[in-house]
Structures are given as C-alpha cells and as structure tokens.
Amino acid sequence: GSGDWPNVDPSDTSPQPLNGEFRVLDYQYAEDDSDNFGTPNFVGTLTVQGRINAGEPGESVSQVQVAIPVSRVNQVATLWAKGNISDSPNSPTIEGTVVSDCAANLNVSSSVNVVRIDQNLVDQDIPNTPTLPDPSPPVVPASGSLGAENPPANMVYQYQIPTLNRSLTVWSGSTVELWTSGEINLEEKYIKCVQAGGIPCDPEDTFKVTIYASGPSDIKLNEGSVLCNVHFHAPDSTVKFNSEGTPNGDCTPDNPSTTPIQVTASFWVNQWEGSTNTVTLNPIANGPQVTAVLPPQLEAVSQWVTQQASP
C-alpha cells in the first residue's frame, strides 16, 4: 500500500538503507486514445515516491510519474508448439507471435514477438483436432483447384487426403478443410490461391486452408515450399524444415513492385526442428485465434515526469 516504504535493496536491513526506500502511490490503466499510427492499445501510468534519510533532518523525498505503453498480443500464433522449437544452430525466422511451453527450448529469431505461456495451466494446451465429419468428405480430386465445385451450405469445402505429398491450388475466396492421417511432405510443393487464368490471388484474399493432421507424422518443409494462408492444426506432429530447395512461385500477385512472400501460415504443432535460412514465416492473414490466454506486452517507457513530492 501507499503507506509502506520497502527498501530499494531488500537485502539492506539497516535503519537508514544506503539506496533508500520507495512506495507506489498510484497506478492507472487506461485505453490509449492517441491517433498516432502504431501506438499501443493501452497505457499504464505509475506514480512512485522514493526517499532517503527517513525521519532525519536531511530527509529527502522525490516523486516520479511514468507512462508505460501496454500492447495487446496478436491472438493468432504464427507458431504454437507444445515442445521444443528448433534444435539447429540457425534459428527459424518468424514474423509474428510464438507461443511455447515455459519448460521448452525456444530458439527463434530475436526480432520476433515471443510470448511464453505455461502449457500446464488448465485449458492452455493445443486443442485436439476435430473428428472427421460424418458423412465422410470426398477425397481430394486428382486435378483442378479445390473449392471450385458447387459451394456447400456452410461455404466450407471439406476433403480427405490420407497422405499430403502434392501441390494444391485453392479457388479464390474459398475456405477449405483437409483431414489427413499420414505424412505431410510439402518440400518443393505449394498450397496457394488462384484466380481465373491461374493468376495468384491478392494477399488480402479471404481464402484459407486448414490442415487437420490426426497422427504423429512429420510435416516436411523446405525453402522450396510455398504456403499461402495455410493453417496446420497438428498437435502431435513435428515440423522438419530442410534448408534446401527453390520455390515454385510465391503468395503475391504477378506484380514486379510487390515483394514476393513465400509463406503465410500458422502452425499448431508438437515441435519445430530445423532452420529457415532464406524463408520468413509470416503470420496468416485470417488465422484462428489460440485458445490460450496470452498476456499483454509491456513496451519501452514513453514518458517520465518528475513531480513535487510531500512526505
């Protein structure tokens, strides 16, 4: 409380601690209504007093007010792993939120927005994959773009594909769900959106592919894999990334002024093994939100004001 004056250095128990004492007077947490682009969503205003020589003629009290920006965490995890992330010396390059068990080895790019949660908390684990629909959906056709048939009532196209080891195209605007129980090998393969004439979709296209992997099989990727707006829901699978391969296309329109993007995806998996040397894993545009509670993130102090203090 504001009446308590704990020592700045808890180990100093002398009557007049060398580093003085402090107390928190007030903390206000409010929405940040700034109109500046990129500002955090909330700001915490902390008012603190410090003093030295308490009760002596030379007693001195100072007071500061600090504004601490607090930003919400993107609830769509680019990578959510139950176990370790990357055993290799070259950590994967990930742009987006990473969620991992506190006890797991987490080795990713230092520039990433890393969020650690304890998977042992109630309802914090990756959910199980949904069961295969009844009646069973059709097997993925041998050719043609998925989502090109007559739209189902819920506008979600569902298919089975026992082993996923081929490239797939998805019709613009379609939402596709795939169920697989075997290995997923997408080295040198692609899953991407197409419009009429085979033109790549716009990055803002609302299409999405969800792959439900019910078995513990590996998900094999390499630098030749092109994944556009794909979500892997595979809590028992391990991603194994091989630093080889040449991509066949990308996820952006055929526009020389647009920087090619090779992977926009989210992975809910057991582990991630291997590095990404020339590929950046970018967040999926409309990926599912994680069921875990991700805490907000404190940013650098934005304001520090000295105030008049009274003992």
Image: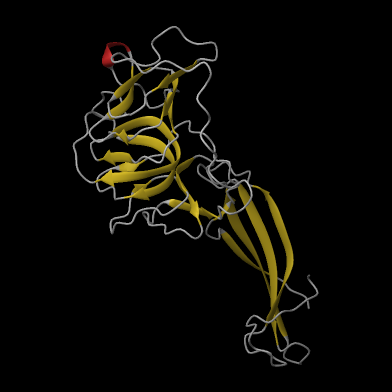
Quadrant housing the C terminus? bottom right
Vertical relation: 4 (above or below) 198? below
| Residue sitting nearer the eye, 35 or 1 | 1
Name of the residue lying farthest toward the right: 3
User: What x and y, as percent, mark residue 137?
Assistant: 46, 17
Name of the residue lying farthest toward the top: 150
Vertical relation: 47 (above or below) 147? below
Q: Left or right of 114: which side holds 24? A: right
Vertical relation: 13 (above or below) 202? below
Please report the residue visible at 51 percent of the width from the left and 41 percent of the height from the top. Answer: 37
User: What x and y, as percent, mark residue 236?
Assistant: 44, 43
Please report the residue visible at 70 percent of the width from the left and 73 percent of the height from the top. Answer: 49
Quadrant housing the N terminus? bottom right
Its colouring scheme is secondary structure
| Residue sitting nearer the eye, 262 or 218 | 218
User: What x and y, as percent, mark residue 115?
Assistant: 50, 52
Please report the residue visible at 37 percent of the width from the left and 48 percent of the height from the top. Answer: 272
The image quadrant that residue 240 belongs to is top left
User: What x and y, as percent, mark residue 226?
Assistant: 29, 32
The number of numbered discs placed on residues in the rendered structure image is: 0
Q: Left or right of 40: which side holds 88? A: left
| Residue sitting nearer the eye, 171 or 30 | 171
| Residue sitting nearer the eye, 108 or 44 | 108
